Amino acid sequence: MTNRSAPPQALALLALLTLLWGTNWPLFRLALEGLSVWSFRTFVAAIAAVALFGAAKLRGERLSVPRRLWLPLLAASIGNITVWGIATTVAVLYLPSGQASILAYTMPLWLAPLAAIFLGQRFTLRLLLAILLGIAAVTLLMIPNFASYAHAPLGLAAGLSAGFAWAVGTVVVKRTDWGGMGLALTAWQVLLSVPPIALGFLLVDGTWPTAGVLAWAVSVYIALVPMAIGTATWFALVHLLPAQIAGLSSVCIPVVAVIAGVLLYNEPLGPLQIAALACAVAALYLALVPPRTATPARA
């Protein structure tokens, strides 16, 4: 990947994923005006699982899982969906959703060494610089929130745990031969996350909340578009790109989330956010665009 550009399909999926997940976090606030965090997570995961299995069935995919794949499938589901959902839920209980999202997108920081250890992916100078720029982008977004993190250490730990779990789940997906499983792989991961998240709802909430039409409409949209389509897009991207570069693709998502917050809620857009966007774009350029090779001089 360092000697050739990313395939056009990967670039299209990256643009789609950034749009779907980046605009998701501001909508989260609208859903939580009528639903609790746990009821929202349970509802979204269940609806997304049904939609993904329906889409996989329409595509003619085999929905059964070979016995040898159940263990890595469960591990991938725990990292990518279950711990991610629960950890971000806990983070949102102690921190504003925007701050929690930024912590969760520290994933490339964890994924880079994990991919080197478990996938044998080497660090080039160009890739290392891209990773550092990606970390800088997330750090710049975190700077205004350091005081909140200091007063909510559990929220900080939960947000970082979400990023780490996502990285582990990505490595599991990348190193496993899934035998041609496509959309069904995403569907099973989401479905396996429903019971533990629903258990959290039963233990914390116990009763289903009464929500307005807007909260339900936003929740259905999040379940079908960012959760179902977005998660499927992410795993397609993971299959097309090396894990380290796929992880870097996530650094633009919190930047888009910040910009969406500016447009929807008139949140401030200052030098730190602009610098973060510049670092994210530079990181993706270094990771996805190959270096130019010198052309031989004419005789």
Image: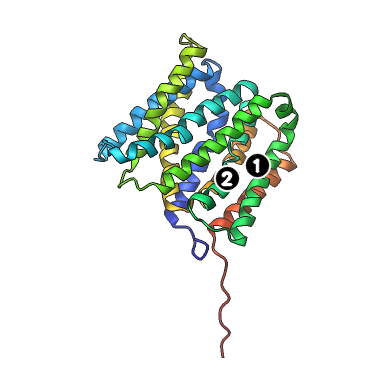
Depicted 40 relative to depicted 131: above or below: above
Task: Kindly identify the amino acid type of the residue bearing the numbered disc 1.
Answer: Val
User: Closer to the observer: label 1 or label 2?
Assistant: 2
Q: Which residue matches tag 1?
A: 138
Left/right placement of residue 268 relative to residue 104 reads right
Depicted 156 relative to depicted 113: above or below: above
Expressed as whole percent of the image width and height from the top left, the position of residue 172 reads: 44, 43
Q: Quadrant of residue 8?
A: bottom left
| Residue nearer the viewer, 117 or 54 | 117
Left/right placement of residue 248 relative to residue 173 reads right
Q: Residue visible at 41% across and 46% down?
A: 236
Expressed as whole percent of the image width and height from the top left, the position of residue 123 reads: 58, 58
Q: Quadrant of residue 70?
A: top left
Q: Which residue matches tag 2?
A: 108
Q: Residue visible at 53% across and 16% down?
A: 36
* Cβ atoms under marks 1 and 2 closer than 8 Å: yes
Expressed as whole percent of the image width and height from the top left, the position of residue 15 reads: 50, 47
